[in-house]
Amino acid sequence: MDAPSFLANRLDRGAVPLVVGDLIALVVLLTVGTLNHQTVEFLTANPLYLPGVFAPFLIAWVAVAPLVGAYSAGAVETAKSSVPLVVRSWIPAALVGLGLRAFVFRGGAELAFAAVMLVLGSVALGGWRALYFRVR
């Protein structure tokens, strides 16, 4: 019998609602942040701007979160296990996203922006998951 692969141990079918919620939380966070710097008129006139803001962080999240365990069996048990896992996943994902933003996509990775993304991303993801387990 083959030992389960590393990634198979990191992905649990019960985490599907967490995947959807995490992606929504990140899109909302990035949209609100963008609206603090750009107008709705600008975003309407430049329909590819917002996807360009989303891309580095969503790519980083999809690549890093499963490796850290954001969607493992432990993540679907309780808020007590899920919230720390999502925050521990967000920190390296945000750093990868900042790197992608600085070197591949439009934008920079200034220290203040990095701090805001680390803190607010942790709050958005952890807060949504805490709410999910309270309502579930």
Image: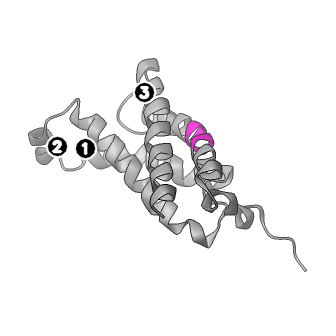
Q: Is residue 126 left or right of residue 31?
A: right
Question: Residue at the spot x=46%, y=54% of the render?
Answer: 22
Alpha-carbon span between mark 1 and mark 3: 20 Å
Going by the image, does 68 lie left or right of 55? right
Crowd tier of the residue under label 3, counting other residues whose Cα lies within 10 Å: few below 14, some 14–19, many 20 or above = few
Give the magenta part as a residue range. 87-92
Q: Toward the viewer: 12 or 110?
A: 12
Kindly state the secondary structure of the residue where label 3 is placed: helix
Which of label 1 and label 3 is nearer to you? 3
Q: How far apart are the alpha carbons under marks 3 and 2?
A: 22 Å
Residue linked to disc 3: 116
Relative image position of residue 50 (x, y in whole percent): 27, 45
Q: Earlier in the sequence, mark 3 or mark 2?
A: 2
As drawn, the label of residue 75 is: none
Q: Position of residue 74 (x, y in %)?
A: 69, 58
**C-beta proximity under 8 Å, tags 2 and 1:** yes
Residue highlighted by disc 1: 49
Give above or below for 115 relative to 7. Answer: above
Mark 2 closeness class: few <14, some 14–19, many ≥20 residues within 10 Å: some
